[in-house]
Amino acid sequence: MSEDVLQMKPIWYFVGLILIIIGVIVLLAGLYYLFEPINFHIELSGLHTSIWWGVVLIIGGCLLSFLNRKPRDL
């Protein structure tokens, strides 16, 4: 007797995918402002925090997606 077992991916897999997408958007915005500077002065703009946060979000999203890629039984 073989039963069909419904398998689903954990929610953290999809959270990881969303973090990757948001990280890519933030990183692209940071790279855009790196080459096209804005006209007004922002304190600590030389740190390029949007680039750093984009990379952090992408790495975190990849970790969540990689560690939770296997389906779980219901």
Image (spheres, rainbow, N blue to C red):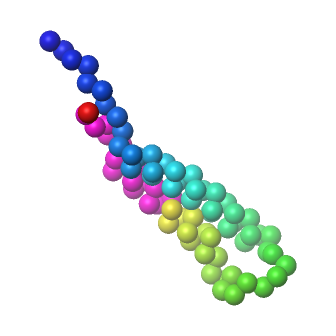
**Residue drawn at the location 66% of the way across and 86% of the way down:** 44
Q: Given the current orientation, which residue lies at the most extreme bottom position?
A: 43
Q: Quadrant of residue 36 in the image? A: bottom right
**Residue drawn at the location 78% of the way across and 85% of the way down:** 41
Front residue (pair 3, 41): 3
* Residue 5 seen from this side: yes
Left or right of residue 15: residue 9:
left
Image location (x, y in percent) of residue 65:
41, 49
**Residue drawn at the location 35% of the way across and 43% of the way down:** 10
* 6 versus 21 height, above or below: above
Left or right of residue 66: residue 47:
right
Image location (x, y in percent) of residue 4:
26, 19
* 66 versus 54 height, above or below: above
Q: Given the current orientation, which residue lies at the most extreme right position?
A: 39
- Magenta stretch: includes residue 40: no
Image location (x, y in percent) of residue 8:
34, 34
**Residue drawn at the location 57% of the way across and 64% of the way down:** 54
Give the magenta range. Answer: 58-73
Image location (x, y in percent) of residue 63:
39, 56
- Magenta stretch: includes residue 69: yes
* 67 versus 37 height, above or below: above
Locate the N terminus by quadrant: top left
Left or right of residue 52: residue 35:
right
Q: Given the current orientation, which residue lies at the most extreme left position?
A: 1
Q: Quadrant of residue 7 in the image? A: top left
* 28 versus 2 height, above or below: below
Q: Given the current orientation, which residue lies at the most extreme front position?
A: 74
Locate the C terminus by quadrant: top left
* Residue 66 seen from this side: no
Q: What type of secondary structure mainly makes up the magenta span?
A: helix
